[in-house]
Image (cartoon, grey):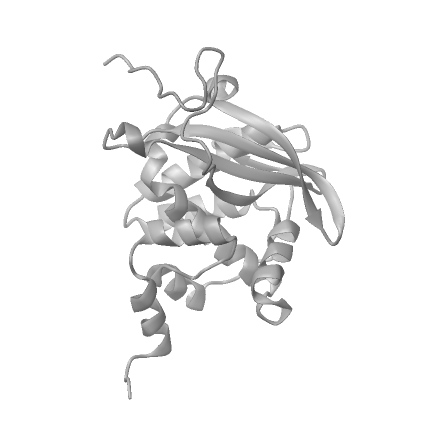
Amino acid sequence: MSNIDPGERSCRLTHDGARWAGWAAVTLGVIIPAACQRDARLADAKLRDPVVKDVTVAGLTLDQKATPQEVTFTLLQAIKADIEAGRDLAAREKAFDDQFALAAPKAIHVQHIRAVGPEHAELKESVYKTVRTWAPTLGHYVKSFDFPVEEISTRMQAKSDSLTINRVAIPERRVLLEAQDPDGDPNAAVVVAVRLVQEEGRWRVWWVGFEHSIRHLPTADRTPGEPMAPQPG
């Protein structure tokens, strides 16, 4: 009979990196507690009520006038800060708080209920666990998030879609950003996808992952299958 604590067993089974956690979350559409550190944090976490309100993050005020692209840009800056903080727990928690403030709690909760059942989907924990997956999911590509807000319109593309919540289709935006492999592998480029809905009249994020059907964004002079031209320097 195993003497391994159930929580430790869960960590061992899923410790094959945050990238696996991200893959599972975005591919299977479920929330998986895949990082030991995140599970430990949850045990001691002071779960707060997820409230959608005006917030200022990375110098941008995200109110009812903020676009999906602006919210996405701000989220990516918070994820970048989270990853780059390393072992600075205070900086990481500040970055997490910024990500949490950009979450769409209602949409996240509904998707969590669909994945695990209502008995395992308490609102605060659903949002907390979901947001905790965002930085590990995109962490490998944070160097591609290092650009000024003025370049949002040239770096990002927004697609209109709809999301069904409680049998009602609501408008959704899917914001796409091309991200390069930091090791320079041209075959490891990806298209980051951030999906947003409106809650309390504000665009907020409910899903973070990748656009698996393409590796490059189409532009006026390039089709989706073609790589980006080499950058100077």
Residue 129 at x, y percent in the picture: 49, 58
Residue 106 at x, y percent in the picture: 66, 52
Quadrant (top left, top right, bottom left, bottom right) of the C terminus:
top left
Of 204 and 119, which appears nearest the observer?
Answer: 119
Residue at the limit of the structure toward the bottom, as seen here:
1
Question: Residue, x 52% and y 38% (percent of image)?
Answer: 194
Question: Residue, x 44% and y 51% (percent of image)?
Answer: 133
Report how many numbered discs are placed on residues in the image: 0
Q: Looking at the image, is 229 positioned above or below residue 216?
A: above
Q: Looking at the image, is 217 positioned above or below residue 233?
A: below
Residue 179 at x, y percent in the picture: 38, 30
Q: Looking at the image, is 221 positioned above or below residue 85?
A: above
In the image, is 63 to the left or to the right of 149? right
Question: Residue, x 25% and y 30% (percent of image)?
Answer: 185
Quadrant (top left, top right, bottom left, bottom right) of the N terminus:
bottom left
Residue 62 sits in quarter? top right
Of 131 and 60, which appears nearest the observer?
Answer: 131
Residue 17 at x, y percent in the picture: 30, 54
In the image, is 219 to the left or to the right of 231? right
Of 46 and 181, which appears nearest the observer?
Answer: 181
